[in-house]
Amino acid sequence: MNSGIEESQFERKNLNLVVVLDISGSMGSAFNQYYYDQYGERRELDTIEGDEEDRDKSKMQVAAESIVALLDHLTADDRLGIVLFDNDAYLAKPLGLVGRTDMGAIAGHILEIEPRGGTNMEAGMRLGTEVFDEYLDIDPAVYENRMISLTDAMPNLGALSEEGLLGISQGNADRGVYATFIGVGIDFNSELVEAITKIRGANYYSVHSGRQFRERMDDEFELMVTPLVFNLLLELDAEGLEIEKVYGSPEANEATGEIMKVNTLFPSRRVEEETRGGLVLLKLERLSADASIRLAVSYEDRLGEVGGDVTDVVIDGQAAEYHANTGIRKGVLLSRYADLMIHWLVDERSAHQEMTPVTPAISLETGIFPPDSVQLGQWERQSIPLQVAEEYRELFSRFIPYFEDEMRAVGDETLSKEVDTLKKLSAPAASPPAASH
C-alpha cells in the first residue's frame, strides 16, 4: 500500500498533545536485560548495539529523556499538556501553546520526576481526557488531538466499561481525541493490542530499551501521531477464481472478497527504498479460464471524505512457483512453515487429550493448508510435554531441504532459526536407557 506521499513532502498537522506518564514505583527499576513478549517468548537485549549506555538508567529516566527529546519536535503552534499518575492523577501542565511556554523549564521539570506509589492508569487517562474539553471543536484539517499514555503495567483486557482503558479510548475517539499507548518494558498481550488497534486513530508500541524509546518518541514521532486514513478496505473481485485462504490479515472475510480491513493506517518510513510493513498472501482456486482479478481499495480521510482506487491484475502464464520478488517468496515460505507447525501442535494436543495415535491431516505432496478451525489460546490452555510423533518427524525432515533452499533463494540468513527448530523437531527420539541387571 503506497500512499504516494514522499517523505520530503510529508507534514503533520498542528498537534494538541497530552502526555499521560506513569510515575509509579515500578518505573524506578531498570529495563530488564530480557523480557517476555506477548507470545511468551523470551527476548534478549544484551546483544543489541546502542543499549549499553542505558544499562544503569531506570525506566523513569529513559522515559523522561525520551519525552524531552519529543519536545524538540513541537512547534510554536502546537499545544502540550502533561498528566502524571501513580495511585491518583495530577495535572503537571495544562494544555497550552508551545510558543507561549518556557519549554526549557518544562524539560527540566520532566527530568526531575521521581517514581512513587502504585499504578492507576485509568485515573491518568480520565484526567488527560478532561484536559481536551475546550479543544474538541478543532478544525481537523489543521489540528490533531492525541493523548500518549506511557506505562510499565499490564492493563486488564477486561476493563471494557466506560471507566476502563478501552472504554475511555473509544469515547475519546468518538470525540476526535486519538490514543497512543506505549508499553515501557512490557508487551501488552495480543488480544489487548488487537482491541486497541480497532479503535479509530489508536496505535500501540512496546519499548524495551532506551534506544527503542528514542526511536519511537524522537526519530519517528511525526509518523506515530499522524493517521493517514481511516476505515481502509481492500476487496478482491475475480469471477474465475475463488479465495481459499488469506494469510496476514485477521480481519479478512474470504466469502465476501474482503481481504484486508484496517481501522487506521499510519505512515511508515522507507529505508533504502524498502518499507517495513506486513504482507497479505492469498491462496486462490481456479474456477474457470478467466484469470483476471480486480483489486479495489476504499478509505476515509481525516476530513471524512471517501476515496479509493482500483487495479486490474491478470495472473495467467506464470509457473506455479513463480514469485514476483523475494518478499513474496519469503511470505509463501513462512506461511507453509507456520501451517505445518499449527497442524503438528493441533494433532499432538488432540492425540494427547484423546489418548489416540497421531495421524497427520496434511501431505507435503498435496500442500499444507491451515486447519479449518484452530484455537491455540495462549492464555487459556495449559502446556503439555514436548512430543513429536514419528509421522511428524518425517514431515519436518522432508520439509527442511525445501526451507533451506528457499532461505538461500531469498537471501535471509535469519531464517536459520527456523531451520534449527525444524532440525530439533525432526531429530530421532532418544532411546530409553538400557535395563540394568
Image (cartoon, rainbow, N blue to C red):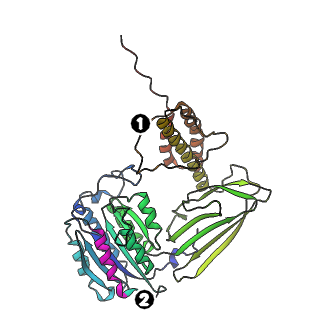
Q: Secondary structure at mark 2?
A: loop
**Which residue position holds label 1?**
385
- Residue 254: give x, y in percent of width and height: 63, 59
Quadrant placement of the C terminus: top left
Quarter residue 136 falls in: bottom left
- From this view, report whether residue 220 is shown above or below residue 129: above
**The quadrant where residue 66 appears:** bottom left
State the residue at coordinates (53%, 74%).
230
Q: Is residue 105 above or below residue 115?
A: below
Task: Say which mark, if any, is on residue 137.
Answer: 2
Mark 2 is on which residue type? Asp
Furthest-top residue in view? 437
Q: Are marks 2 and 1 in contact (CB under 8 Å)?
A: no
Residue 169: x and y, percent?
Answer: 39, 73
Q: Is residue 399 visible?
A: yes
Question: Which one is earlier in the sequence, the residue at label 2 or at label 1?
Answer: 2
At label 2, counting other C-alpha atoms closer than 10 Å, the crowd grade (few under 14, some 14-19, many 20 or more) is: few
- Taking depth in this image into account, of 433 and 33 the one nearest to the observer is 433
- Look at the magenta stretch and give its main secondary structure: helix
Q: Which residue is pictured at 23% across the width and 72% down the height?
A: 88
Numbered range of the magenta stretch: 120-134
Q: Residue at x 26, y 81 (%)?
A: 93
- On screen, residue 204 versus residue 375, left or right, reads left
- The front one of 248 and 172 is 172
- How packed mark 1 is, by other alpha carbons closer than 10 Å (few <14, some 14-19, many 20 or more), is few
Label total for image? 2
